[in-house]
Amino acid sequence: MSKILELIGFALIGGTIYSFVGMMDNPLRWPVFWGCAGGALAIILYRKAKMKLKAI
């Protein structure tokens, strides 16, 4: 499961970078950017919470 989350996280980070750099004149630039950034943040927070529960 963690490897799948890592791959999804890398794809979301790639989408964030692409939307910030590559989509200069596209009107979908900011929704894609914030969606990908929010998804990556959600994965980071999920893994952190899971590791905290595992330590207890």
Image: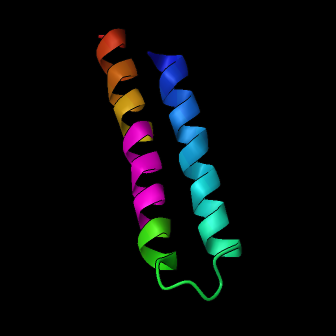
Residue at image x 47%, y 77%? Answer: 28
Residue at image x 55%, y 29%? Answer: 6
Residue at image x 59%, y 51%? Answer: 13
Can you give x and y, in whole percent of width and height, for residue 17 in the image? 65, 62
Span of residues in magenta: 34-43
Is residue 26 or residue 41 the one in the foreground?
26
Q: Is residue 48 above or below residue 14?
A: above
Residue 54 relative to residue 11: left or right: left
Residue 20 relative to residue 53: left or right: right
The quarter of the picture where residue 10 lies is: top right
Can you give x and y, in whole percent of width and height, for residue 45 in the image? 37, 39
Magenta segment's dominant SS is: helix
Can you give x and y, in whole percent of width and height, for residue 56 in the image? 29, 10
**Quadrant placement of the N terminus:** top left
Residue at image x 50%, y 68%? Answer: 33
The quarter of the picture where residue 19 lies is: bottom right
Q: Is residue 46 above or below residue 31?
A: above
| 3 part of magenta stretch | no
Can you give x and y, in whole percent of width and height, for residue 3 in the image? 55, 19
| 36 part of magenta stretch | yes
Residue 40 relative to residue 7: left or right: left
Is residue 48 or residue 37 the one in the foreground?
37
Q: Is residue 38 above or below residue 9?
A: below
Outermost residue, right side: 21
